[in-house]
Amino acid sequence: MLSPKRKIYIAVAVAVVISVCFLVLGVIPFQSQVVRSSRAFTSQRALLDLINVRIDEVKGFQDDRSSLSHNLNRIESVFVEADSPVVFLNHIEMIAQLSNLSIKIYPFQPKVAMDDLWLSVGFRVNLGGRGQDCLRFLEALEQSKWLFEVLELNLQKISDENPNYKEFEGLQKGDAYLSLTVKAYSGEIPAPADRSL
């Protein structure tokens, strides 16, 4: 038989073992679950804040849609239609007519360079008339709304050594002959296979 003192020691030891087991098996896993849940809540809260910011940005974009669509329409109007550049050519002819110049336009297909953002259509524009009219034409063309690049510009005074004036009737010595190579952009993005090195 055990003495009462020994029974107390055993009872205390059993109580300590049960308390330790309860602590190890119950409290520590519960605490780690609370920590995990707290971290998950914090990350979900940060994600929710980010989503709210994105929603506000989308609402702001929708509010600005009308001004943006107006600007997009203005941007689209600077491009030449690749399939039918008639409007651009009519504009060039009108400027030449207003500048009192004779005009001839010849199409060509420009190469697509690696740094070209858009496909383009090319034209060789030959003009004949007075020198100051040629300069007036260039100024009006430069101020037009179209997006184009002048690849080559050649302005010559008509003389006996320069036979280019025979292309136009009614030109005399002292008049000017203007030749432009124009690359007008269509706004269409070139395929990677179309680009030249």
Image: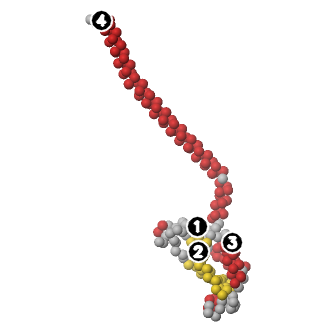
Q: Secondary structure at mark 3?
A: loop
Q: State whether residue 196 is above or below residue 67.
A: below
Residue picked out by circle 2: 183
- Amino acid marked by disc 2: Lys
Give the Cα distance between marks 1 and 2. 12 Å
Q: Secondary structure at mark 4?
A: loop
- Amino acid marked by disc 3: Gln
Residue 43 visible at all: yes
Residue picked out by circle 4: 3
Badge 3 or badge 4: first in the primary sequence: 4
Badge 2 or badge 4: first in the primary sequence: 4
Q: State whether residue 180 is above or below residue 71.
A: below
Give the Cα distance between marks 2 and 3. 16 Å
Query: Mark 2: few, some, or many residues within 10 Å (few <14, many ≥20)?
Result: many
In the drawing, what numbered circle is on residue 34?
none
Q: State whether residue 127 is above or below residue 146.
A: below
